[in-house]
Structures are given as structure tokens and as C-alpha cells.
Image: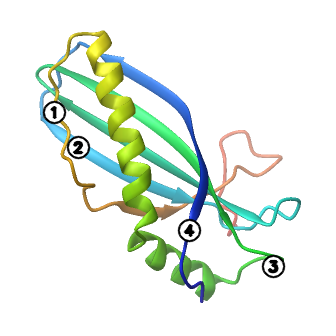
Amino acid sequence: MVEDIRLENPLVLAVQASIANVSEPHVDWTIGYAPEVDPDENRRFVLARLHAGDEDGSVTIEIGAGQNTGPMERIDADADTAFGVQLAASPSLSMLYGLARITAQSLLGTIDSDLKLPWEAPTPEVTRLVRPAENDEEGASLDD
């Protein structure tokens, strides 16, 4: 079981804003984590995505960060599930949300949108990322 999950070196990977209104106001905060540790860097990749919209526009921000694990083998299913549970409760997600929020508010300012985002991070939806199979153009789970 992973103890104190600290995410390092956050980087804004993608930004998008639109002045088109959305039918239902929403704020979605989703977190995906790699099912394995990068063997070259001994890091596990985490992808955070903030998407929000209302009648004044919408915004999407994606941020990547790494969790330094030290030398590890591929993580088994039980440890992988435990990592997801601990990640969901990690204070590091508040740091990622703060970065996503300030980036979003700055971007929304460029299109004169008054979309307001909560100061505190919403409860995240945390999921395990999957990679498409090398021979499958439509993608497949790593568990296949």
C-alpha cells in the first residue's frame, strides 16, 4: 500500500475555452492514474482534468503530474486499487485543482466569460487509465 502520495512537477498539458453556453451548469473534476510505474523514471503518471460550463461558457484544463515511487515492479491489482483510493484522498489533488482553477479563470478572462469555479476542489472521480493495445486501433484495456 502506498503511503503519503505526493505529486510532483505539475504541468498544464491542454487548455480550451468556449463562449458557447451549455444546457446544464456543471463542474467535473476527474483524475486518472497510470496502471504502472514508468520504469525509466520510477514515476507513476497522474492526469487531472477540470471541465466546467454554464450559460456563460465552458472551459477544460488538463494537468499532468508524477508520483515518485522509487524502484518498483508492475503493481498488482490490489495495490493498484489501493493507490486509487489513497490518491482520491490525497491533499496533492487540492494543489492540482488550484493550478487548474487559476489556469481556467485566466483562460476564461480572455473570452470575457464570468463562469465561476468553486474555490475548493470538488470530490474527484478517480479512475485507472488504460492504454490501447498495440494492434488494436480502437483501444483495449490493459486487463484484456
Q: In the shown orientation, is residue 88 left or right of residue 111?
A: right
Q: Please name the residue that numbered disc 4 is placed on.
A: 6
Residue at position x 19%, y 16% in the image: 113
Q: Please name the residue that numbered disc 3 is placed on.
A: 72
Residue type at numbered disc 4: Arg
- Disc with the residue nearer the chain's start (3 vs 4): 4
Residue type at numbered disc 1: Lys
**How far across and how far down the image is residue 3, in percent?**
56, 85
Quarter of the picture holding the C terminus = bottom right
Q: In the shown orientation, is residue 136 left or right of residue 54?
A: right
> How many other residues sit within 10 Å of disc 1, few (<14), some (14-19) or many (≥20)?
some
**How far across and how far down the image is residue 136, in percent?**
75, 45
Q: Please name the residue that numbered disc 1 is placed on.
A: 116
Between residues 111 and 95, which one lies in front from this camera angle?
95
The answer to whether residue 54 is above or below residue 121 is above
Q: Please name the residue that numbered disc 2 is placed on.
A: 27
